[in-house]
Amino acid sequence: MTPTASRPKRQTVPLTYAAAVLGIGDNAAYQLVKRGQWPTPVITIGRLYMVPTWALKQLLEKGNC
């Protein structure tokens, strides 16, 4: 087994990463989350916002971004 094969895939990514993938800025992403308008589920851990990778992938596949 290779080292990369044994490493689990990420289940979540930071909101800032998801924003970059969608082509929007960090501030806009945080504002969308605070207004409840971010297009995917968001997991909040303290002040950290994480986006499930399955939801981001599904959004990109639909082309609704």
Image: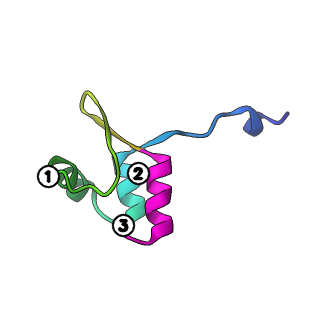
Crowd rating for badge 3 (residues with CA inside 10 Å; few <14, some 14–19, many 20+): few
Q: What kind of element bears circle 1?
A: loop
**Secondary element type, mark 3:** loop
Q: Which residue is mark 3?
A: 23
Q: Is residue 64 found inside the magenta-colored segment of the image? A: yes
- Quadrant of the image occupied by residue 56: bottom left
- Residue in view at x 31 percent, y 58 percent: 39
Residue type, label 3? Gly
Q: Quadrant of the C terminus?
A: bottom left
Q: Mark 1 = which residue?
A: 35
Farthest residue to the right: give it: 1
Q: Note whether 33 is above or below 22 in the view shown.
A: above
The residue that disc 2 covers is 17
Crowding near the residue tagged with mark 1, few <14, some 14–19, many ≥20 C-alpha atoms within 10 Å: few
Q: Position of residue 22 (x, y in %)?
A: 38, 64
User: Residue 32 location in percent, x, y?
Assistant: 20, 55
* Colouring used for the render: rainbow
Q: Residue at horizontal 46%, vertical 40%?
A: 12
Say which amino acid is labelled 1.
Arg
| Residue 44 image offset from top left, x and y in percent | 29, 34
Magenta residues span 52-65
> Dividing the image into 4 quarters, which one contains the N terminus?
top right
Q: Splitting the image into 4 quarters, where does residue 4 fall?
A: top right
Circles 2 and 1, Cβ within 8 Å, touching? The answer is no
Q: Amino acid at mark 2?
A: Tyr
Between discs 3 and 1, the one toward the N terminus:
3
The stretch drawn in magenta includes residue 51: no
**Residue 15: mark:** none
User: Which comes sooner in the sequence, label 2 or label 1?
Assistant: 2
